[in-house]
Image (spheres, coloured by chain):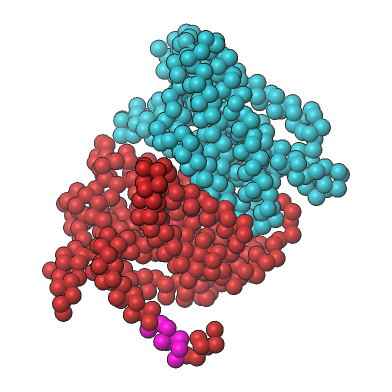
Amino acid sequence: MNIFSKPQAKWLGVALVAIALVGLPFALAAAGTAWVRITNLAILFVFLSLGLNIVVGFAGLLDLGYIAFYAVGAYVYALLASPHFNLHLPFWVILPIGALVACLFGVLLGAPTLKLRGDYLAIVTLGFGEIVRIFLNNLSQPVNITNGPQGISRIDPFSFGAFSFSQTETLFGLVFSGPIKYYYLLLALLLLVIVINLRLQHSRIGRAWEAVREDEIAARAMGINTTGIKLLAFAMGASFGGVAGGMFAAIQGFISPESFVLVESVMVLSMVVLGGMGNVWGVVLGAVLLSFVPELLRYTVEPVQKSLFGRTIIEPEVIRMLLFGLALVLMMLYRPAGLLPSAVRKRELAQPKRSAQ
Amino acid sequence: MDIFLQQIINGLTLGSVYAVVALGYTMVYGIIQLINFAHGEVVMIGAMVAFSVITALAGTALPPVLIVLAGVLAAVPVCMLVGYAMERIAYRPLRGAPRLAPLITAIGISIILQHVALLVWSRNPLAFPQIIPLVSFDVGGAIITGVQIAIILTSVLMMVGLTLMVYRTKLGIAMRATSQNPQIAGLMGIDIDRIIAFTFIVGAALGAVAGVMVGTYYGVAHYTMGSLLGLKAFSAAVLGGIGNLAGAMLGGILLGIVEALGAGYIGDLTNNVFGSNYQDVFAFLVLIAVLVFRPSGLLGERVGDRA
């Protein structure tokens, strides 16, 4: 603690973390390119969690259909940059469009429901997530828009002119494979998103969200347009989801409605809750943990079971889901503020409201 | 065959199942203002347990009605236990915590129940053994099957029973008092914790029977069947006015009919642009429409808008 109070030491720490992050993909690539891909997906989940954190953590609105915005972003990208409609727009054009469309969906969903109590919102968003998925699954007739359950494949990767993010290049004797290039892009964007989130939290808007979350009536009495500010949180969260979805589509090169099921929404929510609702660094931690631990389990649980019993008794997928469920319940019961609680949450949860309901 | 009448009959059948499940949501909501997200999973567990018992007994010479009854009798206590455990572990410690907390544990519990069911019964759907002879009657050009009649009758019976319990017994009075004002009810000598636990148990028992009914109707039970059913039943409860028993029944039946008619006619109405594969969307559209135009539901009292 004392060491870090010195500014030089703090910068040293930041520099060390930066070097570690820059070197990470090469270390991972040594273990297998799969791990670089897993890391990229983990970063996407950090994006998503940060987006959901705006809605759930900052503004205190439970959104259970968050993955729908991710789906919208992904499909916007896929439709505008794939042979499906024979459109190949550059990614810097599509990502903002995706963000905008997702934002629009957020407003459409939020406008009628945000006047209501929080728990209604939870259910309506859950329903919305399902509706989006049902439409993605079925909008292949009579006009083939989404290509139904088969999904859309051969989606363009990100590229600047001749520089494509999917090709392998060698620079200064180092091999930069596609996933490694994406890693650096994602890392840069992640830094940007984290900075935006940190700035948002302490801005006028961020304080308004906090006020609405803590006591809506009091916030309204203070002159905050509560519906408007909630809608803003919703729209912002949605557009983060949209951008993340677009990147997901480009990195994977293939998307289908399968990737956007309710479980994914719950997973992102678990990440936010585990890390600490409302705390940006907590959410990052939660997302990283819940992205990597299941992968580690996949590589350990199955061989262990095979060697012990000769067959897989519990699939890693099931263990993963049980883990998410347990994380949600146990965190709420024993550490409701998350692993890294935000200061306000800590205070709030230390003195629960007196209503005995 | 008269399509309209047929869809009404199908809607009534499904609607009465929704109504019974919706009662579980509405009772819990009425008493502690909590959306019990995991209620759908209780229904699923009920169906799975009953199916296991029914499949095990299918080879014996017992009459089919007795076999199904045995399934129900096995499912109800299991679900009661699940309901009680859920309340004790996930909700009671969080009474008085911020609203978000019990909602999140509810989601956690529902995931856990789903995957425990997956572990116990595997990924494959359980099929209902062919033990019930197919009986059907012709009603004005439409067909109603024996199973449909049984489902509707059972639902009505349970609704009447529940209404009598809530309005005629001492326990019911205690439940209503707790839902109106827990503190005062406590001062009047009512053991609130027990009443709340009891509410969960009754809701779970209803859910178990509903699970058996819906499983018998569709002929399959699957570990994921609970979430969509629960969502629809919740929509039904909101449609009728959440916290209101008569509302849940009305909402359930209305939703069933809307869904059946919607699925039956959407193709004709939209020139086959949309087909019956959009059936599941109707419940949500109804839910959103109700929340926009009449958040208190058809029979409900005004809902406060505190977050």
Of all residues shown, which one is farthest toward the left?
A: A162
Question: Which of the two residues, A124 or A299, is positioned nearer the viewer here?
Answer: A299
The location of residue A318, given as percent across then percent down, is: 43, 46
The residue at the point 32 percent across, 41 percent down is A137
Q: Which chain is red?
A: A
The location of residue A155, given as percent across then percent down, is: 21, 54
The residue at the point 50 percent across, 25 percent down is B51
**Would you place residue B184 above or below residue B8 in this image?**
below
Q: In the rendered view, does B235 fall on the left or right side of B218?
A: right
Inspect the magenta stretch and tell me whether residue A11 lies in it: yes
From the image, state the color of chain B: cyan
Q: Quadrant of the N terminus of chain A?
A: bottom right
The residue at the point 43 percent across, 35 percent down is B122
The boundaries of the magenta stretch are A8-15
The location of residue A123, given as percent across then percent down, is: 53, 46
The residue at the point 35 percent across, 27 percent down is B268
